[in-house]
Amino acid sequence: QVQLKESGGGLVQAGGSLRLSCAASGRTFNGYFMDWFRQAPGKEREFVAGINWSIGSTSYAGSVKGRFTISRDNAKNTGYLQMDSLKPEDTAVYYCGARPAGRLEYAYWGQGTQVTVSS
């Protein structure tokens, strides 16, 4: 059974940092994209950052570019989202998802982790 499990969320003051992890089990993700999304109360889920697991190329939403860094560790089968210079508007539940390269549908989702940034 394939599972994605996020961790690393919490409460942090504005300007602080957090590192989220997405631990994958049940398969490797070569040929997949691992993406991070977030959903704030009353808002739609939005794309934050993505990484091509095989070659490591990355993409970011404009709102986080320059502050967040996505990465992956093949040996640990884990993806990461380093979040620096956090702002109150970054407060949301953060989810990781994995989709096969070339497809738009996500095959796997984690359960989410709460990030709260206080002003």
Image: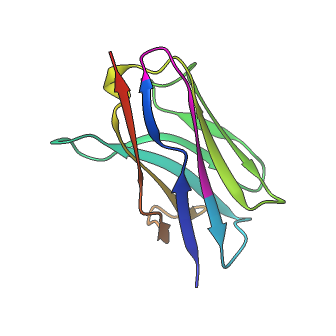
* Dominant SS in magenta: strand
Please tell me whether residue 60 belongs to the stretch shown in magenta: no
Residue 73 visible in the displayed image: yes
Above or below 46: residue 7: below
Drawn side of residue 44 relative to residue 37, left or right: left
Residue 52 visible in the displayed image: no
**Which residue is depicted at the point 76% across and 56% down?**
54
Give the x, y percent position of residue 44.
23, 45
Above or below 36: residue 74: below
Q: Residue furthest right?
A: 75
**Which residue is depicted at the point 45% across and 39% down?**
10
Drawn side of residue 87 relative to residue 5, left or right: left
Drawn side of residue 104 relative to residue 7, left or right: left
Quadrant hosting residue 77 = bottom right
Colour pattern of the rendering? rainbow
Please tell me whether residue 14 belongs to the stretch shown in magenta: yes
Drawn side of residue 18 relative to residue 110, left or right: right
Quadrant hosting residue 32 = bottom right
Figure quadrant of the N terminus: bottom right
Which region of the structure is painted magenta? 13-22
Give the x, y percent position of residue 84.
56, 22
Q: Residue furthest bottom?
A: 1
Figure quadrant of the C terminus: top left
Q: Nearer the viewer, residue 37 or 57?
A: 37
Label tally: 0
**Which residue is depicted at the point 65% across and 39% down?**
58
**Which residue is depicted at the point 53% across and 56% down?**
6
Q: Residue furthest left?
A: 42
Above or below 31: residue 6: above
Quadrant hosting residue 88 = top left
